Structure formats: structure tokens, C-alpha cells
Amino acid sequence: MKIYNSLTQRVEEFVPNEPGKVSMYTCGPTVYHFAHIGNLRTYIMEDVLEKTLRYADYDVKRVMNITDVGHLSSDADTGEDKMIKGAKREHKTVMEIAKFYTDAFFSDMAKLNIKMPDVVEPATNCIDEFIKMISALLEKGFAYKAGENIYFDTSKLKSYYVFGNQSEEELMVGVRDDVTEDTNKKNKNDFVLWFTKSKFEDQALKWDSPWGVGYPGWHIECSCISMKHLGEKMDIHCGGVDNMFPHHTNEIAQSESFLGHRWCNYWFHVHHLNDQTGKMSKSKGEFLTVSLLEKKGYNPVAYRLFCLQSHYRKPLMFSFEALDQAEGTYKKLINRIASVKAEGSTDEAALKEWKNKFVEAVGNDINTSMGITLLYDVLKSDLNGATKRAIIADYDKVLSLDLIKAADASAPADEHANDDPELVAYVEGKIAERKAAKKEKNFELADAIRAELLEKGIVIEDTREGVKWKKA
Ligand code: AMP
Ligand code: ZN
């Protein structure tokens, strides 16, 4: 398999630390509001990455955190606390908000056929681990106390900007400019590991620590939660592109300073879903959610297809017209699959051959649109029905578009169940004869069969789903 690595800015052959095994970490949602469909684009593409690895026979362990404390609205260490903001908005406690939006997120995941990661851990579960790592960073001289908070000292690093050649200016895009600079910091990029003297008087969740009662900064949770479950070396770390700076940059800074060695080898970043007004964001007032799509009558799986039609490393423009198109494509695809009867026995050699094609195509930096193209190739091929269905079901382990389930549900009920079985057998036989005649380009015979049926009061019709018949 090949994946693009944001660290080297190249598509690389994927080589895990341990042969056959993959440890994978996903930055989870900040649960102060519903996820918007932009966030969910990122989780859909990460889900495809995980499933492609599994499809290629890797034994994957995937961990995701839930940010229920510490994420500040500037995405740096200044600005409003997102969880407090959510609690105030809804007159609820921070924990009530966290529980409600965590459940809402899981429900969105299920609707989009996103697999639950093997481990899902809320930040508030791991305060002890955070304290241990922060203590070690202080001991090693990578952190300092100022204004009663603990900060990471970025001047102690050989290199801080690890994600290629992006300029500082580019990296700062998306960081709000109306936030006041924290004067406790020794260096501009230093970030908070632990707050005790908070500007958030109303911070509800506080814990005892060697530095006083307080709460963690945002970045520490991903370093600690990933190490807790995946150990000191990890294969792939995922997130949206906006996570690259400062979040992932800071995760690497503190993790590698703590460990004293390289931490994660591959960094997978999904580009943004934009709408006409620009990047989709939760702080922009009304935003698009899965429930809103459902209310408007869309099948959430059509949104998944919409995402799979584009490459994850390109920004994707959302519009309802584009979603309509994806839904149209989905319906046509399902109808085509529904017309494939499970005839013959599965050709195991072909199944293997087509599986290899899929790994080759989608395994090339998660090229999902190539995976969809392969589906059509299977449908167009002259494989028997049972084999086609087996390959499609197999591809759907990665694509997760409910292909067989939706096709079977859409297949028309047996329209002739109440007709005379002898008549049904006769007509079906004639239809098969006519199909064979057409295949041999004997159109005269085909027409003669149609006329013969008409004489007996049977009208046949060629449709996209095959030949239909009724009594005239
Ligand atoms: P958050 O809940 O804000 O922490 O974001 C959850 C995930 O969604 C993170 O991986 C973000 O990088 C990602 N994300 C945020 N905005 C977008 C967007 N417009 N398109 C795609 N992914 C996004
Ligand atoms: Zn993270």
C-alpha cells in the first residue's frame, strides 16, 4: 500500500513498525456541538483508510479520543473554552453537553457506516496520564511554569515546524486573529500543558495536580491517549488538515521530547469540505449536519458516496446540487446491482483477482474514486451473477455503501407470484430464448418470440432492470 505522508510530503510505500500490524490514531471530535458534514468527511476518509488496511490483511488497532475538556476556540491556547461555550449556550453542565454530543456523534457515524474505532477514550478519563507526561516534560527541561500555568518550551526543540516547508504564515491561517497574546509565554509558539491560573473562572472541570487545581491544555490528550493504547511507537496518525498546526505540531513536540525518539511515522490529513462561503465551521452559526440532510430527504450513505467520489487530498466543494447528483448516481448504481441475479457459483479465482485490483487501486493513497470505477467494471464484466455479487459485497467492506443490502431491498417483489405457475414458466422460458436470440444477433427470431407472446396476450418490455412482462 502507498499513502501520502504529510511529514515528508510524498506518497510513500507504507511499512508498519511491526509486519502485518498497524497502530492508528484518530483525533476525535470536540463534543460541544453536533459534528458538521465537513468533520464527517474527515472521519469517512479515515474510516476508508482503516478498512483498506484491513482489506489488505493488516491487523489494525485504531484509537480515537473524545475531546471533552481543554479545547479552546482559537485552536491555540487562548480564546474561549469550547465546552464551556456549549454548556452556556444550552444551559447545561459541561458533562451533560459532552455526553449528548458524543452520543450524537456516534449516531452520525453509524448512519454514515463509519466503523467505531477499537478504542474510544474521553480526555477526562486520562488526567493521571496527562499529569505524568507533564511532570516528565518538566523534569527533562522541556516545560516551564509561568503565571501558574505549565507551558511547553518550543525553544528547546531542534525543529518545531515538522510538516514540510509550510511557512509560518500559511500555518497560521485559520487561527483567529482576535485573540490576545498570552504574555506568560517565553516564545510565541509555546503552548499550555496545564492551566491552574485560568482566565476561565467558570471552568467546571478541575483536577488536583502537583501544580495546583486546574485542567489540561488541548494537545496533551492525544499524545497520552495514543501512548496508553498503542505504545511508544505508532504507525499512522490522522486528522483534518487544520489539525496539522498547531495541534499535530504540538503533539509531536511534546511526545518526542517525552519519549526521546521518533513517535509516529505516517501522518494522514484529510482536506476540508467547503461550502460557497468557505470552510465549513461549527462556530459559523447554522451548519450542515447529518440530521439536516435526513430532514431534507437525503440518504446519509449518498453523502458518503459523494465523499468517496473525490480524493481526500483535495478540498471538496459542497452544494445540494452536487449531493443530488451523488444521490442520483447512488440510486442508479443500486438498481444496476439489483439487476444482477445470484446465478451460478462464485468463481473464487476471479474473486481473488478482483480483490487484488481493488487493493492496488484504492491502496494507492486511498484512491476511492478508482474503487468506485472498479465497481462499474465488475458490473460490466462477463462474470456470472453470483461472482459479481460476491465481489461487490467484498468491495463494500471498504466502501461501506450498503450496496447489496440496498440492492436486495430495492429489487421488486415477485410480480407474478399469483399467476398460473405454468404460464410463468412458459413466459420466462420464452424471455430466456429471446435473450439468447438477441445475444446471437438473431433479431428476427427475437421479434418472432415477442409476437408469439403477444398473440397469447403477454406484453414484454425491456427495462434497465431487465425484461418485464404483463398480461395485455
Ligand atoms: P473538531 O470537532 O473541531 O475537533 O474537528 C473534528 C475533525 O474534523 C478534525 O479532524 C478536524 O480537522 C476536521 N475538520 C474540521 N473542519 C473540517 C472541514 N471543513 N472539512 C473536513 N474536516 C474538517
Ligand atoms: Zn489530536
Image (cartoon, grey):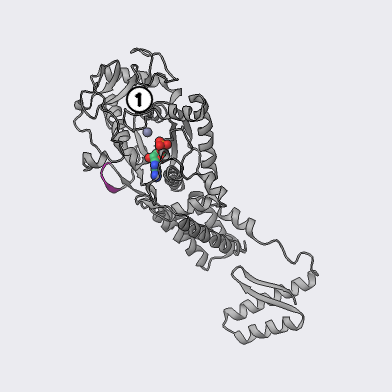
> How crowded is the residue under tag 1: few (<14 C-alpha within 10 Å), some, or many (20+)?
many
Q: Quadrant of ligand 1?
A: top left
Q: Is residue 247 left or right of residue 321?
A: left
Q: Residue at x 64, y 83 (%)?
A: 446
**Per the image, is 352 magenta?**
no
Q: Nearer the viewer, residue 301 or 443?
A: 301
Q: Mark 1 highlights which residue?
A: 217
Query: Front-most of 423 and 30?
Result: 30
Q: Does the numbered disc 1 mark a residue whose Cβ is under 8 Å from ligand 2?
A: no
Residue 361 coordinates in the image, percent (x, y): 40, 56
Task: Inspect this view and state whether residue 96 appears.
Answer: yes
Q: Quadrant of the C terminus?
A: bottom right
Q: Residue furthest bottom?
A: 444
Magenta stretch, overall SS: loop
| Residue 12 position within the rendered picture, expressed as x and y whole percent measured from the top left | 30, 48
Residue 374: where, in percent of width, then height? 45, 60
The three-letter code of the residue at mark 1 reads Gly
Task: Tell me where the magenta segment starts and ends, as one range.
Answer: 7-11
Q: Quadrant of residue 132?
A: top left
Question: Horizontal placement of 228 versus 389: left or right?
Answer: left
10 magenta-colored = yes
Which quarter of the picture shows residue 23?
top left
